Image (cartoon, helix red, strand yellow):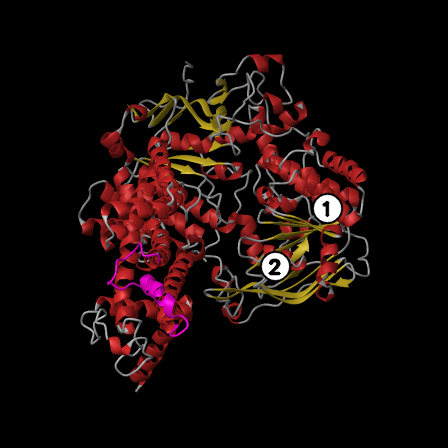
Amino acid sequence: MMEPAKDSTETGGEPLLRVEDLVVEYRLAGKVVHAVSGVSFVLARGETLGLVGESGCGKSTLARALLQLTPARSGRVLFDGIDLTTVAGAALRALRRRLQIIFQDPIASLNPRRRVADLIAEPLRIAGVRDEAEHERRMIEVLEAVGLDPSQVRGRFAHEFSGGQCQRICIARALILEPELIVCDEPVSALDVSIRAQILNLLEAMKARYGLTLLFIAHDLAVVKAVSDRVAVMYLGKLCEVAPTEHLFRNPGHPYTALLLQAIPRPDPAAPIPERVALGEPPSPMAPPSGCRFRTRCQRAAARCSEEEPQLTEIAPKQLVACHFPLRGGVEASLAER
Amino acid sequence: MGAATQARPARPLLAIEGVSVELPTPRGALRAVAGVSLELAAGRTLGIVGESGSGKTMLSRAVARLLPRRAKLTGAVHFDGHNLAELDAEALRRLRGRSLAFVFQDPMTSLNPVLTIGAQIIETLREHLGLDRSAAVRRAIELLGQVGIPSPDQRLRQYPHQFSGGMRQRVAIAIALSCEPKLLIADEPTTALDVTVQAQILDLLAREQRRRGMAMILITHDLGVVAGRTDEVAVMYAGRVVERAPTHILFKAMRMPYTQALIAAIPKLDAPPHTPLKAISGLPPDLTRPSEGCAFAPRCPYASGRCRQSPPPLTGSGAQQFACWHPLEPAVATAP
Amino acid sequence: MRTSKAAIVGAADAAAELWAGFAKFGWLFWLALAWIGWIVLAAGLADLLPLPSPTDMDMLERRAPPSAAHWLGTDRLGRDMLARLIHGGRISLTVAILAPLIGLLIGGALGILAGYFRGLLETVVVGGVDVLLAFPPLVLALAITAYLGQTVANLTYIIGILSIPAFTRVARAATLSLAKREFILAARAMGATELRILLRELLPNVILPLMAFFLLAVAVTIVVEGALSFLGLGVPPPAPSWGGMIGEGRESLETAPRIAFLPALFMFLTVLSFNVVGDTLRVLTDPRQAAL
C-alpha cells in the first residue's frame, strides 16, 4: 500500500478532494484492463487541477471512479473528509449534489426527449426541491449565467442546439445545485475551435462566480494550460508528474511530459518541427510494462526502470515526478539530453 | 516547406473552378460548398482549414467525386489535364487510387474489417498496377516498411482490429501511396489520433510527400497542423474560401478577420495560465439559410452595413487572396 | 385593413407550416392512417351501424352479387358480406391489437430490465425468451387450443405470449444502446435513483422504437390470426373473421371469387396500412434521423 505523496501545495486545513491509491480495473474479453493503477493526488478548495493524458491513459475512468459511477477495486476518495467509496444509497445520493460532472459529448449528455427547462430543473427535483417557483427562479438565473436566453431555450430539445450551446446547458445543469466540485471530462474536445474558447472562458467565469473547485481533464495541453493552476500528467493508469502549470510547461520533469509538449502542433510556421525519433505506440492497458510503464518509449530508460516502479517524489518545490532519471532544466535542455 | 519562388507550371495539377455542392435536407437545401475556386501545382502542399460546417470535407469529396448520391454538384474540376465531369464511371474509377488518393479521418472505418490488410493493399496494387501476386506482395511489404510498420511481412496477414489507431492510419496511408499518386488528399488524417501519434503521422506524410514529389491537400480544423507542413493555406467558412495565402504570410499577415480571430482563439502554449481567451462570439452559420452578405458578419468585430448586404468577392494580388470588405492592414510579412 | 392582411398572411404561413408537417410523413402514410381509422371505427361501432346481421342466412340469395340490399353481395350461405367483413374486422383487430399488447407490456418490461441491469437478470431473461422462441408456434397453439378450448380469448393469450420474445429483443437492444449514453450517466451523477432513471430517462426514449415495432407486430398478428382461422384453428364459427372467410370462400372460387378475395383484400389493406404507419414512425423516431 503506497503512502500518498506529500503534496506541499496543501495549505492549512483539509483539501476538498483527496484521492489515495485509487485502483480501477475491469474485464474486457476475458482480460483485465488496468485502467487506473494506484493514483493519488489532492485538490485544494478553489483550485483547478488539470489532468492530461492521451487516450487509454485512464483519465476518463478516473473521473467516473471519483464520482462513484464506476466501481473502484481499491483506494479511497475523500471528499471533504468523507470516504465516498464507503458511502452508498441515500447518503451517497445526498453527497452527489456537491460533486458534479460535465462530459465530453454535450448532446449525448442530454435526454433527447426532454425539454431544456425540464432538464435543468431535474437536479433540483432529485434533491427534493418541490417548489415550482423555486425551480423557475434558479433555472432562469443559471441559464443567464451561462449566456443563454431562458425564454429562447427553455421549451426546446437538445437536438435543436449546437454542440457549444448544449455544453452551456450541461454546465447550467451542473451549476444549479451550486456544487463545490465539478469534474470536467474533456468538456471542449468535441467542440469547434471558435466555440472552445467561449466555453473555456465561461468555465473560468463560473468558477469565479460560484467559487468552484475544478478537475479539468483533457488531452490538449494548451487547453489545460489556459485554465489550470496545477497540472497532473497521466500515462497508462499512473501519474507521471504533478506540478504547478507554469513550472510544468517550462521545466518538465518527466520524459513523457517533455514528449507531449514536443508533439503539440504549434500554430506558428516559424517554429521548427523537432527532429523526432520514432518512439512507437503506447502499450495496451491490458499488459502494461513492468516497472515504469513509460520505459518502452523512453530514451532514458535503463535496467532499473524495468525492475523498480518509480514513485512520485518531489524533485523541486511543488513538483512531483515519478521517474528514476527525471529531467532537469527546461524543455530545450531535455531535447539536448536526447 | 519554404516559400515557393519557382515559376508556376503552365497548367496546375488540380484546378477547381466555381464548385458548389448542395444537399437536400428536411429543413431545406443546404449549401455545403458555395462557389469555390482553387488551384494546386504539382508537388505542393495545400492546407484547407475550417471548422465543422465550413465545407472542407464536402469540397474534397467533390474533387474525388465521392459525394453522396443526393448531392448536387456544379462547377468544374480539372485534374491532370482531365475534366472530371467528362470522364465516365470506369475512367474515374481508374483515376481514383491510381493518380488521386484519399486518406480518411477514421482509420477504424476506412479499412475493411473482414479482410487482412495484406489483402487490401495487394488488391489495390493488382487492380491499378497490374502486378502479379508475388510482385504485389513484395511491394506491399516494402510499403508497410516505408510507413513505419514493424515486421511488415508478418503484419500483412493480420486484420485491422489487431492494429492500433495510429498503425491503422499508417496502413491507410500505405494503401493510398501504393500506386504513386500524383495527388493525395488527407481529410483530417490525425484528428482521431493521440497527440504523440499525430505528430508521427504528420511527419510521415510530409516525408513521403517530399520523397515522391506528390501534391498533397491536408484538410484539418487545427491550424497548428498546417503551420509547419504546408506551402499554402486556404481558410474556409460557410462553404466559401475566405482567405488563401502562402502559409507564413497567413499566420503573420492575415487579411481576413476570421483568420485572425481563429488564430487568436487558440490557447497558446506560451501564454501564462488563466489568460482569458479571445473567443469568437456568436454561433457558426446555418447553412440552410445562407445570409445575404458576408457569412462571418454576425460574428465579426469589424462588420459594417455593407458586410451584411453583399457578399465580398475573393480579391487580392498574387498569392494572397481574401474575401472581405474591410481586410486587415497588410503587415510586413516576416521572412520565412 | 393592415391587420386583416397580416391575419391572412399569418393564416397562410400557418397553413404552409401545417402542410410541411403533413408532407413530412408522406401521402402514403396519411392514406394508410385513413384506412386504419375507418376500419377501426367501423369495427368498433359495428353493432350500431345499419348493417344486416352477419349471421343471418338468406338461402335465396346465396353467392349473390352486390346489390342495394347487400352492398358487397353475400357468401355461400347467404350472409351479408359487408356485415361479415366489418364484424370479422372487429374480431381480427381485437386479437391483433390485444395480443401484441401483451407482448409489449411483458416483453418490453423484461427487455428493458435485462438491458439495463445486465448480469444474472439479463442471462435469465434472454435464456427464458430463447426457450420460448424455440417452441414451434403453430404446434404450441394447437396444443393449447386443444387443451383449453378454442376461444377468442385463448387465441389472444397464445399469440400474445408467443410475441414476447420479439418485444424483449427490441426493448433490450434499444436499452443497451441508450444506457451507454452520457445522459443516463449524468442522471446517476445527479443522484437519481435507478427507478427514476428507468422511468424518467430511459422509458421515454425506449418507448418510441417499441411503439413502432408494436404497429408492425399488429400487422403480423392479423396475418397469424388469419392463418389460424383459415386452418380452422382460430376463431370458431359462426363468428366471422377474415381468415375464416377466406377459408370458406375457397369452394366458391370458380363461381363467386369475390367471397374469398374481399376478406383477403381487407386483410391486405389493413396489414399494409399498419406496416406503412409503423415503418414511417420507426424512421421518424430514429434519433439519427431526428438530429438532422
Q: Is residue B165 visible?
A: yes
The percent position of residue A26, horizontal first and vertical second, equals 44, 27
* Nearest to N terminus: mark 2 or mark 1: 2
- Label 2 neighbour load within 10 Å: few <14, some 14-19, many 20+: some
How far apart are labels 2 and 1 at the CA level? 21 Å
Q: Is residue C237 shown in magenta?
A: yes
Looking at the rendered image, the disc whose residue lies closer to the viewer, 2 or 1, is 1
Give the structural element (helix, strand or loop) at label 2. loop
Q: Which residue is mark 2?
A: B67
- Chain under disc 1: B
- Start and end of the magenta stretch? C231-257
The percent position of residue C159, horizontal first and vertical second, equals 31, 50
Q: Is residue C18 shown in magenta?
A: no
Tell me if B68 is positioned left or right of A110 in this view.
Answer: right
Q: Which residue is mark 1?
A: B124
The percent position of residue B330, horizontal first and vertical second, equals 64, 57
Q: Is residue B44 visible?
A: no
Given residues C287 and C7, the one toward you in this image is C287
The quadrant the N terminus of chain C occupies is bottom left
- Label 1 neighbour load within 10 Å: few <14, some 14-19, many 20+: many
Tell me if B9 is positioned left or right of B328 in this view.
Answer: right
Tell me if C126 is positioned left or right of B184 in this view.
Answer: left
The dot on residue A194 is: none
Is the residue C189 above or below the residue B263 in the image? above
Given residues C39 and A148, the one toward you in this image is C39
Tag 1: residue type?
A: Thr
Tag 2: residue type?
A: Leu
